Image (cartoon, rainbow, N blue to C red):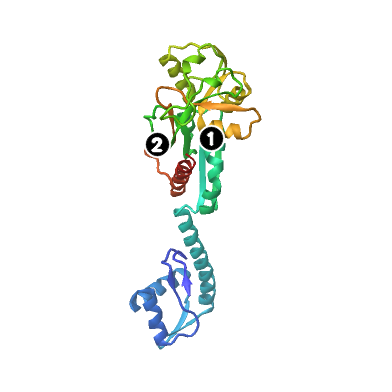
């Protein structure tokens, strides 16, 4: 019968109740992997602590006293709890149970988190994911909160103060209404995924831009500089989804990662286009980032791999 280690600080072992023949006693100590003298000393010390005998001893037969019966009764319960704890600890240590706290720009919830949650929860049904979405997303600020395990976001310059892993690379596209007068200027061009258009044609068009400290906003300003452009800006926003939808409706021209555009277009009612631009494709990189040196639980690493595989499939 199992006995929990720490009933009065002793080791978990196996005790046998009832009448014991000598051979049963010898069998019991073999199961315990301790010698007969050690077992006898262990029982004697335990009886001294309890203030009374646990067994009547006669001719190498052990019969439990009333105190011994009650001790064994509780020892069985303690052993059962110990076995439950062993199983739960195994689950926790292998991250079958737990939490995963993620901070992301708000639109990334639809593009990479929502499509991958079913697979993650099929692997880790008892891990709760807490997603913190922010329109004004700054990775370094999010990770100052030690409760955040991971951030996923787009970069064109890799962070120096964070550890990160690349999830995907995708094109930054130009978004406009399908009825825009310049839409007919787009052409097929080798090396580009979408119809290509010369960005300089839009030098007098209204733009809807993200702020320069955001990834896509910073890319837009660099493109304008490379092309010697200073177009009118109708609206600055930190909301990628709003900038895309306004461009689709014809209010102005916007830039966005192609996955953001496709997500908005799948729910939009206005015909629109996404076009390639630049002398070569303008690429942004989605990374998973976390503080330097921080230990990541296995379920977090597995989720990064699930997202990476999903991104590879959809490209």
- Mark 2 or mark 1, which is nearer the start of the sequence? 1
| Residue 258 in the image: above or below residue 247 | below
Image-based side of 34 in relation to 254, left or right? left
| Residue 10 in the image: above or below residue 272 | below
Location of residue 191 (image quadrant): top left
Residue occupying image coordinates x 51% and y 44%: 100
| Residue 113 in the image: above or below residue 18 | above
Question: For the view shown, which residue lies furthest in the right direction?
Answer: 269
The residue beneath circle 1 is 108
- The spot of residue 109 in percent (x, y) is 55, 37
- Between the C-alphas of marks 1 and 2, the distance is 17 Å
Tell me the crowding category of disc 2: few under 14, some 14 to 19, or many 20 or more residues within 10 angstroms, Cα based: some
- The spot of residue 241 in percent (x, y) is 58, 28
Residue 14 at least partly seen: yes
The residue beneath circle 2 is 164
Element at badge 2? strand
Marks 2 and 1: in contact by CB < 8 Å?
A: no
| Residue 68 in the image: above or below residue 136 | below
- The spot of residue 67 in percent (x, y) is 52, 75
- Seen from the viewer's position, the closer of residues 74 and 153 is 153
Residue 95's disc is none
- The spot of residue 23 in percent (x, y) is 39, 86
């Amino acid at each position: 019968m199992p006995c929990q280690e720490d009933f009065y600080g002793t080791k978990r072992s196996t005790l046998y109740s009832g009448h014991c023949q000598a051979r049963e006693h010898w069998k019991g100590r073999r199961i315990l992997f301790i010698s007969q003298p050690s077992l006898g000393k262990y029982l004697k010390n335990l009886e001294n602590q309890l203030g009374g005998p646990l067994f009547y001893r006669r001719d190498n037969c052990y019969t439990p006293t009333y105190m011994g019966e009650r001790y064994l009764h509780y020892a069985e319960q303690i052993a059962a709890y110990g076995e439950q704890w062993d199983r739960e600890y195994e689950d926790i240590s292998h991250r079958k149970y737990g939490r995963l706290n993620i901070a992301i720009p708000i639109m990334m919830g639809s593009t990479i988190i929502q499509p991958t949650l079913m697979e993650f929860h099929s692997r880790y049904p008892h891990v709760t994911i807490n997603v913190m979405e922010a329109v004004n997303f700054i990775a370094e600020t999010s990770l100052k909160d030690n409760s955040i395990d991971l951030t996923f976001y787009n970069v064109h310059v890799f962070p120096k103060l964070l550890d990160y892993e690349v999830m995907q690379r995708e094109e930054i596209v130009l978004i406009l209404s399908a009825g825009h007068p310049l839409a007919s200027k787009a052409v097929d061009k080798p090396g580009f995924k979408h119809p290509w258009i010369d960005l300089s044609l839009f030098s007098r068009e209204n733009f809807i831009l993200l702020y320069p400290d955001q990834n896509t906003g910073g890319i837009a300003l660099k493109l304008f500089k490379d092309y010697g452009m200073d177009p009118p800006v109708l609206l600055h926003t930190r909301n990628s989804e709003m900038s895309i939808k306004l461009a689709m409706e014809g209010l102005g021209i916007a830039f966005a990662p192609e996955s953001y555009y496709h997500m908005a277009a799948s729910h939009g009612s206005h015909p629109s286009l996404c076009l390639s631009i630049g002398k070569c494709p303008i690429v942004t990189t989605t990374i998973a980032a976390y503080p330097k040196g921080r230990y990541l639980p296995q379920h977090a690493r597995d989720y990064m791999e699930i997202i990476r595989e999903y991104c590879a499939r959809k490209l």
